[in-house]
Image (cartoon, coloured by chain):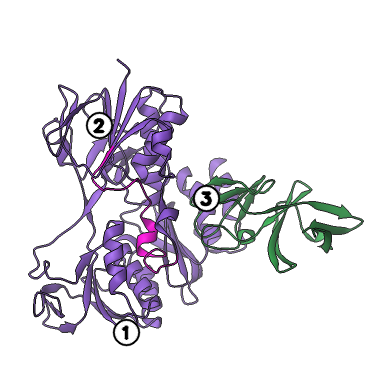
Chain colours: A green, B purple
Amino acid sequence: MAEFVAVGRADDLREGDMRALDVKDTKIAVANVGGTFYAFGDTCTHMECSLAEGDLEETTVTCPCHGSEFDVTSGEVLARPAREPVGSYEVRVVGENLEIKI
Amino acid sequence: MPETLMIVGANLTGGEAVATLRQEGFDGRVVLIGAEPRAPYERPPLSKEYLRGESSFEQALVRAPDYYYENAIETHFGVRATRVYAAEKVVELEGGERVSYDKLLIATGGRNRRFPIPGLDLQGVYDLRTVDDCDRIRAESTPGRRAVVVGMGFIGSEVAASLRQLGVDVVVVERDPVPLRRVLGEEVGRVMEGIHRDHGATLVFEDTVAALEGEGGRVGRVRTGHGRLIECDFVVMGLGIEPVTELLADTGAEIDNGIVVDEYCRTSVEGIYAAGDVANHYHPVFGRRIRVEHWQNALKQGPAAARSMLGKGDRYEEIPWFWSDQYDANLQYAGYHTEWDELVVRGSMEERNFVAFYRKGGRVLAAVAVNRGKELRRSMRLIKAQRPVDATKLQDPDVDLRTLVEAADGR
């Protein structure tokens, strides 16, 4: 059953940055967009590169390997070559901690 | 009569073009004609994951097979268009059928170059363009078999890598002293050479194929220009493509290294457009014509041409970009260069983790990266800006390439 899992301190992730985390054996990327946190599947659905290694511009993440783009707020594909969305996860800040629902 | 927009070339460019016509609300007749007996599909996997059996053909399809019927797109797959009669606005198909159009997009792409080498017709000699070609190569590619790959451009390099990954013994014969020299230059070519050697490919440089030989109608060895004899079980030719332009031969359309088009994908003949590998297009950023044989151009130029046909066109000025995965190395290139006076490297070529900038007169014309894709993508705006950039900043990994764009823009 999905539950919120603490993954670290919120202030460790600066604005505009991303980080890949292992949460319950799932690779999840967390992005800080202007102070709002988004969590999504880190593994690109095209060729399995880590999206957190790519670039974040506003709410768009670009895969470093082949340029696929995803909306970090929903996991939807914005640009190919990827065709399948990545997962999208709820995030909340409790005290100083970031929690992801998985 | 509703207007008829016709696209010749049922591939990524053509498939994206017809989809764009419908997305833009065109409700007239759309006709898509293609020589291959299949719905449009993407070709990059054919030298990589599909060849290695890691992905399916369905995954390569541009749209689901039902898409064309559901969107009232009239398809002629497996039918070659042979001739365009521009004055009558008619396309003739093989078999003689004539189809009228109001506007026509040519997206016929390329065909593999064939040189007059004796023995090309032997069994076991392949080249790679279609999924059927790929299936034939795949069927030969079992561990321990011996392949000769001829040519070490992108297709030859990727096929060689995939075959090694499948356990095939690979010898590559390449005319140049390093792989990919024509596009990337010697320094970067040497990095790619090292990667192939580390994975056990045997590389024969500065030699050519004089003949393919064998007994019983099947290839058994390759004879090189320098007299080497290379025993093998099969051969894959990778000597590049030439644009397929013949069907416009009688139209008066300008043909020069492909079909010449402007930045709106318009040929010199009213009502006829071209896009994709076949189109030698004027590029506003580089101030010259370029012809691009890569996935991203096929993906983006088809829609650009479609919008142009609808009178909604913008200038097509995508910065060319492509990737080439070989073994575990991810190579990416962006921009366009034919010559440069300085190669500025950020990172380490030795460690195969770098982005290198092709600079001329202080401007970055193009960049190539190995295993450093994020910075390659960040350099694309720098290339588009076409302003002088400080080399020490390009080299410094602590300098965010995006800030250099802003600095260049601010001048």
Task: Give above or below for B367 relative to B66.
Answer: below
Task: Look at the image and tell me whether residue B411 can be seen.
Answer: no
The chain carrying label 3 is: A
> Residue A30 versus residue B76: which sits nearer the camera?
B76
* Identity of the residue drawn at 34% across and 34% down: B263
Q: Quadrant of the N terminus of chain A?
A: bottom right
> Residue A17 versus residue B20: which sits nearer the camera?
B20
Circle 2 Cα neighbour tier, 10 Å, few/some/many (<14 / 14–19 / ≥20):
many
Q: Are marks 2 and 1 in contact (CB under 8 Å)?
A: no
| Distance from Cα at disc 2 to Cα at disc 3 | 33 Å
Q: Which of pointers 2 and 1 indicates the residue nearer the eye?
A: 1
Determine the secondary structure under disc 1: loop
| Residue corresponding to mark 3 | A83
Residue B8: image location, x then y, percent: 26, 37
The segment highlighted magenta reads B33-54
In terms of image quadrants, where is residue B115? Answer: bottom left
> Residue B87 versus residue B73: which sits nearer the camera?
B73
Any mark on residue B267, and which? 2
Determine the secondary structure under disc 2: loop
* Identity of the residue drawn at 31% across and 51% down: B293
Circle 1 Cα neighbour tier, 10 Å, few/some/many (<14 / 14–19 / ≥20):
few
| Distance from Cα at disc 1 to Cα at disc 3 | 35 Å
The chain carrying label 2 is: B
Task: Give above or below for B47 relative to B277.
Answer: below
Both on one chain, marks 2 and 3?
no
Any mark on residue B144, and which? 1
Instruction: Report if residue B97 lies within the magenta region.
Output: no
| Distance from Cα at disc 2 to Cα at disc 1 | 50 Å
- Kind of residue indicated by mark 3: Arg
